[in-house]
Amino acid sequence: MKHFIAPTLVLALALLGLGVWTRGFTAFTVFSHTLQTAGSLPRSLAPIDLVDQDGNIFRLGNAKKYTLVNFVYLNCPFVCHKINNRLEGIYRALQPSLVPQKLQLVTVSFDTEHDDTARIKKYRRQFGAHLDGWTFALPYGIDKTAFDEFLVRLGVWAQAAPERDIINHSIFLFLLTPDKKITRVFDPARESDAQILTELRTQVAR
């Protein structure tokens, strides 16, 4: 019997440590862990100013409508463009009575070193000439350290890998209410476009 005590104790301690690290066995990746650490929903959005593809400065969440926000960088070799292609499908599937009257989309680049308004404007054109209610933007009036802190507080994990010239990052979509609350976080890796559309319509209709 004594031979089983030590291994059992080690296993119990290991499970306890794993449970603490994964926040109750709910966050098994650095992406989900960062999101969980940011806090439960609904929660307030930290203030941040952005500049859109036309050079207009605005504060995220000040539009008095629902806002679906995602984060990308234009040198991304694959996943950012895949997510934005899916967002285009979601955007075009939403009724005009929702977008842009009650809901807007905002795609923010977190590559403050390489992306500028000219680049995001050119990139935006790839999704069509008329994109009322879908803004592409960059952080404005904030240094990289403060912007990185904003991302962490929001629940976005992003880490540059200079040796590979990429930025590893999470791909969550954040839904903001008209009163600047984060009310829903979508995970395109686990939720279909149909599921996201259904939830968006439900949230905005409330």
Image: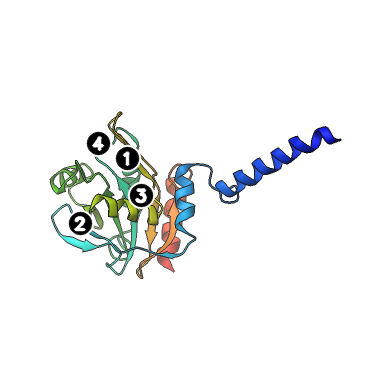
With respect to residue 66, does 110 lie above or below?
Answer: above
Q: Where does label 4 land, which residue?
A: 75
The mark nearer the N terminus, 4 or 2, is 4
The mark nearer the N terminus, 3 or 2, is 3
- Please name the residue shown 46% across and 43% down the image: 30
Q: Residue furthest right?
A: 1
The circle on residue 80 is: 1
The mark nearer the N terminus, 2 or 1, is 1
In the rendered structure, the answer to whether residue 1 lies left or right of residue 62 reads: right
Identify the amino acid type marked 2: Tyr
- Please name the residue shown 70% across and 38% down the image: 10
Identify the amino acid type marked 3: Ile
Q: Where does label 3 land, which residue?
A: 90
Q: Point out the image quarter for the N terminus.
A: top right
With respect to residue 52, does 112 lie above or below?
Answer: above
What element does badge 4 sit on?
Answer: loop
Q: In whole angstroms, how far apart are the C-alphas of marks 4 and 3?
A: 23 Å
The mark nearer the N terminus, 1 or 4, is 4
Give yes or no for contact between labels 4 and 3 (Cβ–Cβ under 8 Å): no
Q: Is residue 97 visible?
A: yes
User: Dot 1, how many residues are within 10 Å of its Cα: few (below 14), some (14-19), or many (20+)?
Assistant: many
Foreground of the two, 106 or 72: 72
The circle on residue 140 is: 2
In the rendered structure, the answer to whether residue 170 lies left or right of residue 99 reads: right
Count all numbered tags in the image, as a single digit: 4
Q: In whole angstroms, how far apart are the C-alphas of marks 2 and 1?
A: 21 Å
Foreground of the two, 80 or 29: 29
The mark nearer the N terminus, 1 or 3, is 1
Q: Name the mark nearer the viewer: 2 or 1.
A: 2
Q: Name the mark nearer the viewer: 3 or 2.
A: 2
Give yes or no for contact between labels 1 and 4 (Cβ–Cβ under 8 Å): no
